[in-house]
Amino acid sequence: MQTELHTFPRRLLQHGKDRPLKPAFREKYLGIWQTWNWAQVNEEVRALACGLAAQGFQRGMNLAIIGDNRPRLYWAMLAAQCLGGVPVPLYQDAPAADMAFVLENAEIRYAVVEDQEQVDKLLELKASCPDIAHIAYEDERGMRNYMQPELTSFAKLQELGRAYDKANPGFYEAAIAAGQEFDNAIILYTSGTTGKPKGVCQTHSALIAAATGGIGFDNLKDSEDILSYLPMAWVGDCLFSLAQAMVAGFTVNCPESSDTVMTDMREIGPTYYFAPPRIFENMLTQVMIRMEDAGTLKRKMFQHYMDVARRCGADILDGKDVPLSDRIAYALGDLLVYGPLKNVLGLSRVRVAYTAGAAIGPDLFRFYRSIGINLKQFYGSTETCAYICLQPDGKIKFDSVGLPAPGVEVKLAANGEVLVKSPTLMDCYYKRPDATSEAIDEQGYFHTGDAGLFDSEGHLKIIDRAADVGKLNGGAMFAPNYIENKLKFFPFIKEAVAFGNQRDQVTAFINIDMEAVGNWAERRNIAYSGYTDLAAHAQTYELIKECIEKVNADLASEALMGDTQVHRFLVLHKELDPDDDELTRTRKVRRKFVAEKYAVLIDALYSGKAVQHIETQVKFEDGRSGMIAADLQIQDSKTFPVIGKAAA
């Protein structure tokens, strides 16, 4: 690494010199794509940084960033870094109360936010977070009558900055020159699955090391296009949309809104794409819904060529030997099915696609690779800049997360926990030396909290969170996430929570996918009034039961997991929701909280009851609370003899 480029602001200046006219950021606004080249981005960031300095922002201070993915919010991150400050992105969909802890913990005095909605949240928190003194907002719609002294529009802040820059020649360059590689570049707060979120402090050095390693691994160029649509507070977006973009100099494209992501994605045609498993699951759900609505001929053609793809598509993608007849059939399938399908999904130009954040079901993984999309898994965490293991081209295994990434050492503790030593490791947890010393041992290994194992070729397999792995009373290993991911492969199942630790058998809660099951119900003339009504319908239960029994048959073929087939299940009367604290903002189940909240349902699953009444408090979008009551049906599902045991 060139020593003069060891911080992101220095990288920004260099891109302005090396590729001034190349597109750096795009944003779709009112249906039209706006573009800024690297020279323009340098000017925008300079004005913003000097504006913050004029307001009193100094080295070592933290800057809150709140909103959807917007070029100006990424520029705010860079502006803070230019001054030696630290950006702290927050989840934009979090209610004000959930933001209070981070704002207080990070000692936020300055914030740059997207719009009126986020301004209102911060003003609501002024009583509990009185230190917030300056709030700049990007979108001026709805802000005309806001007269609070702490408010400034983004445009006016930049005007202030240009005047400050003119009055203080050399200030901006000196501030960037003072930055060092081991300065904190960002604070990313963990999702708080098991408690209060912790602020992960990542240095410029760590993030640049992760970005450089990933870019070299996949031979990424400055010609790549990516779509930036995942929360800016998530480490995955930080790696792809900030760190890798600033190292490689490729183009970051921001969609108009969350509702237009798929349309905008088709227009951009990204060459490099990242999404958590849930996004890929949703895409497949949309495909299956469209196929169910298609005519008989189209359905049969789709099924025929998907059988061809399953047989040889992944091998063709990996460059393996495939019979000529299969190659011809696959080429015809690409013309008639796979090509049009990839175009609809916006994946026609994708050269490399990644998924992470949670385990992806092997069947889902196989589907995308079979139609020619180079989808790969990587494994990482917020504490490691999302950089631990990567899957090399041609050596993809559906049940592994790949080999240790360049420069990363991975080993297993005696209890199977994955331990990592890497230049991408966090500096510390913000103001939490106790938690830091718990996470990083005296030898410098980070304890991931994940249970894993290496196969004979050195590929790492993640079984589950170490804390979640248990045993059935019969002695079989119980890995709930493994079972849940198999269930969520079906488009009708949006979420699943499995139980079984220190129990005789496994049971599960199911959340239906409202769109997929709703479409299925309408085509069968099944009337329903909403989620609760549809979830309780007898035919919905039969549909979910079929899915569960297919998973059980699959589990029965695995000697290690065969005893963890789902014996009983219920369909929850409400969707698990981050606003109800049942999921994190990254949509991970808060297992302990769910188990406590729905203890009466778990007891009913294991006591043999056929019906259980439940009343649940929920939060509505407008902030009000209410109660939902329902009588939930509990059903048995068919299980199968474990093949490994039968052979023994």
Image (cartoon, rainbow, N blue to C red):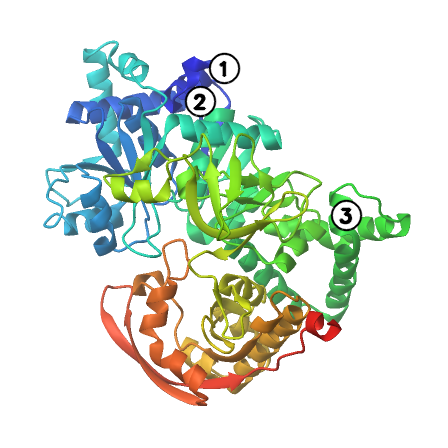
Image point 20% across, 12% down: which residue?
A: 168
In which quadrant of the rendered view does residue 644 lie?
bottom right
What's under tag 3, amino acid-wise? Answer: Asp
Secondary structure at badge 3 equals helix
Tell me the tag on residue 38. Answer: 2
Q: Nearer the viewer, residue 647 or 230?
A: 647
Left or right, 118 with respect to 351, comes to left
The extreme front residue here reads 414
Residue 358 in sight here: yes
In which quadrant of the rendered view does residue 485 lie?
bottom right
Ranked by sequence position, the earlier of labels 3 and 2 is 2
Q: Nearer the viewer, mark 3 or mark 1?
A: 3
Image point 61% across, 29% down: which residue?
A: 219
Give percent across and percent down for residue 154. Answer: 26, 33
What's under tag 1, amino acid-wise? Answer: Asp
Ranked by sequence position, the earlier of labels 3 and 1 is 1
Q: Which quarter of the rendered picture does the C terminus lie within?
A: bottom right
Secondary structure at badge 2 equals helix
Give percent across and percent down for residue 501. Answer: 45, 70
Ranked by sequence position, the earlier of labels 2 and 1 is 1
Question: How far apart are the two marked residues, 3 and 1, measured between alpha carbons?
Answer: 40 Å
Identify the residue position indicated by label 1 in the image.
18
In the rendered structure, are the residues bearing label 2 and label 1 in contact, judged by CB atoms less than 8 Å apart? yes
What's under tag 2, amino acid-wise? Answer: Trp
Tell me the tag on residue 459. Answer: none
Left or right, 323 with respect to 112, comes to right
